[in-house]
Image: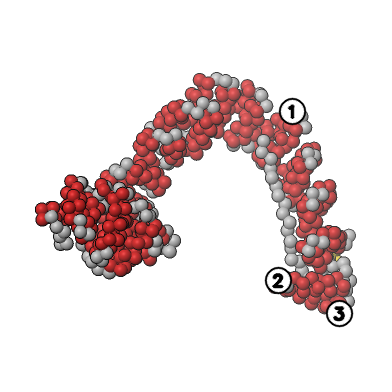
Amino acid sequence: MRKILYIAGLVSLLVACGTARKQSVSADLTPVEEKDPLTYEQRRKFDYYFLEAVRMKQKGEYDAAFELYSHCLDIYPESAAALYEISQFYMALGQEQKGEEALKRAVRADEENFWYKQSLAAYYQSKRDIPKAVSVYEDMARQFPSRLEPLISLVDLYGRTKSYAEEIKALDRLEELDGKSEQISMEKFRCYTLMNNQEQAFKEIESLSKEYPYDMRYQTILGDVYMDSGKMQEAYDTYTHILQEVPGYAPALLALASYYKKQGNDSLYHTQIDTILLNDNVESDTKMELMRQMIVQSERTTRDSTEIIGLFKRILKRPQQNADLAMLCAQYMITKRMEKESKPVLDQILSLDPENKPARLQLLSYAIRDNDLDEVIRVALPALEYNPDAMEFYYYLGLAYYQKKDTDKALDVFRKGLKQVDEKSDKHFVSDFYAILGDIYHAKEMKAEAYAAYDSSLVYNPDNIGALNNYAYYLSVERKELDKAEEMSYRTVKAEPDNATYLDTYAWILFEKARYTEARIYIEQAMKNGGDTSQVIVEHCGDIYYMSGEKEKALEYWKKAASLDSSPDDGSAPRTEAELRRLKRKIALKKYIAE
């Protein structure tokens, strides 16, 4: 049963200077001005010190403010405003006894001030001195009969102390002021139940439903109360009455399903569940809540997903108000490792909600894992319209086009993607973006643009190993800026000393610098780490052996290179016809050919 939680906060009020000029009302209702207890000179000084204290407090000069308030009390010891302010200082300084005394004096000095009493009651409440807090709140409730705050606090305090009879009285007074409500009635029902007064408890809920006869929510609450209390016939009659009045009313349909389950009637329970889930007029949120409950129940008992999946399939065949149920189904399937089954559901989500980024990313992850380039394109291409600020889609779409050798489309996508870069973009991701763009430019023989892209990549991430390697290798192939290339390549080898590609790049740069002995050390490491399956690395190995004076060994490696596949496994550009012709000439002439 839900308990209302009313919280009365500590409220501080900046009051006007002094407390003079109060007005009282005489028997003939003619206002009579009270005489100021201070002389003119005392009042002038008091007001000056008080206003100056307020100014110091607002400036944060609390020591000065405290002294000035103390001066005020020297002039007028019974000033409620000054006593209240000085009490707050004592509380802040941890001198609670002095603070409490000053606050009580402020209350006595100005009995009409609601907020002084509120502060005193809240102080007692914070100290867990419930009897004193209750006493103050009760006094406030009598003195300020139109205010809700004291009654709300009393309800909370009486509930904490299990003073249920007193809590009901406070709730009755609150109800008189604020009107009948579900929260008040349910709290009174709880109190009566705890007092073992079942008759009064039911009367409370019945009166609530009678108060709002056309609000089926209260009728449903009444039915729930009957069922929770074991009055099953009354509960059933209430639910069926509601459904006669409002056919298809979702809360009553759900309640009736709970009724059948509690009765152990599984057949009617499942029929009722289908009635709800396959009803196009039931709100999607209601169906979502029911499916969540059923998933939790399944996980606690059989953990058999067959029934849940079957329900989802039947639901998703119906027209959908939104993509929520399909999303819940996909999430459930993914947790059950039903990836194949989740794909059509994810597609359904995108048909209902094309901007659903999580669903699109999930589908994209499957396509990337399976290296299905056409599927990557199918999933990612619409995202440029529906999720234009998500750079992931530009990246993988452009990469898919690049691997399919459609460099024009790849270049177009990457250029569009870079327009989305801003100060919030992930720098490492942007660096990878520029690195791939550099590869594309190089494949299109746009070398200046390629090197500019690599430079941009390294600005965003100076440790981008892939960009460092490719940049260094392409410089070495052109035999330009070899010192810069060597420096970049050496960083990749240090970062990944077992990477055959990086070892090959470094070896080749050393080769171009005529440092053949060093080149041979690194190319041999590359071969040992898997490079012996790469046509490029094996050919480089032959070149380095040739220049090291081992021409027979070089020929063996060239022949082995010719027998290997010329299309790289990593998706990079295949070797050109010119490169393949040069390899054949090396074998035929049995010597190294640079160009």
Which residue is at the front of the view, 313 or 397?
A: 397
Q: Residue at x 68, y 33 (%)?
A: 205
Cα distance between the residues tagged 3 and 2: 29 Å
Q: Are marks 3 and 2 in contact (CB under 8 Å)?
A: no
Horizontal side of 479 relative to 177 (left or right) equals left
**Amino acid at dot 1:** Glu
**Amino acid at dot 3:** Glu
Q: Is residue 190 above or below residue 55?
A: above
Which residue is at the front of the view, 395 or 444?
A: 444
Which residue is at the front of the view, 355 or 252?
A: 355
Q: Residue at x 80, y 39 (%)?
A: 163
Of circles 2 and 1, the one toward us is 2
Q: Please provide percent x and percent y for residue 589.
A: 10, 56
Give the SS element for disc 1.
helix
Give the SS element for disc 3.
helix
Q: Please provide percent x and percent y for residue 425.
A: 42, 60
Location of the N terminus by quadrant is top right
Cα distance between the residues tagged 1 and 3: 68 Å
Q: Count of labels shown?
A: 3
Which residue is at the front of the view, 239 or 352?
A: 352
Residue topped by disc 1: 199
For residue 41, the mark is 3
Query: Are there few (<14), some (14-19), or many (20+) residues within 10 Å of tag 2?
Result: few
Q: Are marks 1 and 3 in contact (CB under 8 Å)?
A: no
Query: Are there few (<14), some (14-19), or many (20+) residues within 10 Å of tag 3?
Result: few
Q: Are marks 2 and 1 in contact (CB under 8 Å)?
A: no
For residue 60, the mark is 2
**Amino acid at dot 2:** Gly
Horizontal side of 117 relative to 539 (left or right) equals right
Horizontal side of 433 relative to 298 (left or right) equals left
Horizontal side of 572 relative to 576 (left or right) equals right
